[in-house]
Amino acid sequence: MAKLVDRTNEVAALRALANRRKPALALLYGRRRVGKTFLLDNAWPKEQRIFYFLAADTTPDQNRIELLDELSRWSARRLEPNDYRSWRNVFRLFVDLAEQSSLVVVLDEFQYLMGTADDIVSHLVAVWDREIKGRPLTLILAGSQVATMERLERGDGPLYGRPDWIGKLRAFDYRDAARMMPRRSHRDAATFFGIFGGTPRYLATIEARDTIAARTITSMLSPTGDVHVQLGNLIEQEKGIRDTAEYRAVLTAVAAGRTLTDEIADAAGLGERLHVTQRALQILEELGFVERERNFGASERTPWRTRISDNAVRFWHRFVLPNRSRLERGMISEVWKTSVAPALDTYMGKIFEGMAHQAYTRYHEDWGLRADSAWSRWEGQDRNRRSIELDIVASLDDGRMLLGEVKWSSRPIGSEVHTQLLRNVEDLAHSGQKWAHDALRPDGMRYIYYSAAGFTDSFETLAHQDSCIRLVALRDLYAP
């Protein structure tokens, strides 16, 4: 079997379905390029009897004819399309084939099979509910049109209550991304993640001997680069989005630093159509391109702030789009030298904050800390109008608070960072922030500091003496 990174739970679930030797229905979905097809190609052992069909962006009827043609070759049976004019007959055929022995059928890009006149889902339900007869048929419906696939299994959806397993495939976190480029320094692995994100297809372009500069220039900055081309058509690839120009405008507005919905609408030229902006943000969030946040402890009436959550999309809007004229003119190396390289450490600051939360989820037990029940940051002013920013404000499931800072630094950080954080929390408590007041109660707080360049000896000594302080160096994020 080809090497799979992560996806252990998905492989185990898919194999368990086939091993039950009875009917099993599953849904697998996720945005494009996250590795659904690769997973489905490598989930089962070679001896498993599998029929795989990748639907095309054409009519359902044409897909049905092509499926029967491929199934004829796979089964060595002569199958005439005129004998299987409806999808109900096709599903009955799968049931018959499963009579011989256990059979896995994968219908990939299932959304392309869904028409209106001949609704494939209603035919599937009819066969599944009345004619499956206990046959060992495992049917996997996979798709990249996330909203469409999710609607199938919701409370009012046609498949509600029927799937035995539902999986939503997401992009890799920083740790699994690093497994696609082994034998890298920790700093290089983190930087590659900051540029290419966790999309397996993008990470697959990185070769063993690539430097960060060479691969970024070749794949991301060059107008003919693989990742450049894909990101340039990012919205168009999502077939469920009709008004792609509006979605691109909304995404660009968020990338430019607009965070509130009305600000985003105005920047996108949709000021009088706020509902369009809201719908676009919802879909972009479902696809994993943006995410919402607000200050820790903010009321439910506080507006959400939206920001880019996909690193490749963030890099594209930060460095590629503003330089697209120069890039098209062939000034690719110059853009790297003058625009990207000097700003890369500053850019990585926000990336490292996201990595910090991912690392906490993975390693908090090893670090002697409880799981977080809420994780955010805080930015604003105290009662004296002094600006304050805290990178980490979290509540733990034991009732304590976790506060901290995240530094993508080139030099070790010292204990003055801790001193400043304590002052900030005290000022916020005196300014009426309830969470800060609660954090100051005896034994009510834990502290965590992340530094890409490590810590000074004095800070290490302080943390050794105070069990409430946890220091996390970059190497700690890449523990086995």
Image (cartoon, grey):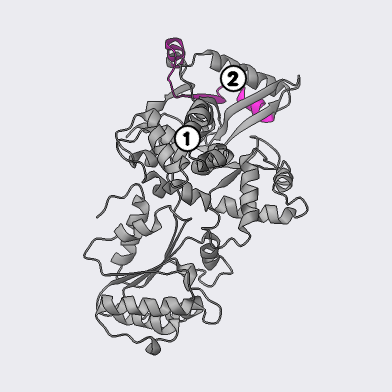
User: Which residue position holds label 1?
Assistant: 355
Residue 222 to residue 434: above or below: below
Type of the residue with mark 2: Leu
What x and y, as percent, mark residue 98? 30, 77
Instruction: Assign the N terminus to one quadrant of the image.
Output: bottom left
Residue 131 is labelled as none
Res. 286 in view: yes
Q: Residue furthest front?
A: 329
Left or right of residue 477: residue 344: right
User: Which residue position holds label 2?
Assistant: 421
Type of the residue with mark 1: Met
| Image point (54%, 37%), residue name | 319
Gap in Å between the C-alphas at discs 1 and 2? 20 Å
What x and y, as percent, mark residue 346? 53, 27
Label 2 crowd (10 A; few <14 / some 14-19 / many >=20): some
Q: Is residue 478 magenta?
A: no
- Residue closer to the observer: 338 or 135: 338
Res. 128 in view: no
The stretch of residues the image draws in magenta is 434-463
Tell me the quarter of the picture where residue 255 sits. top right
Instruction: Assign the C terminus to one quadrant of the image.
Output: top left
What x and y, as percent, mark residue 25? 41, 69
Asked if the residue at tag 2 contacts the one at tag 1, i.e. Cβ–Cβ closer than 8 Å, the answer is no
Q: Residue furthest left?
A: 47
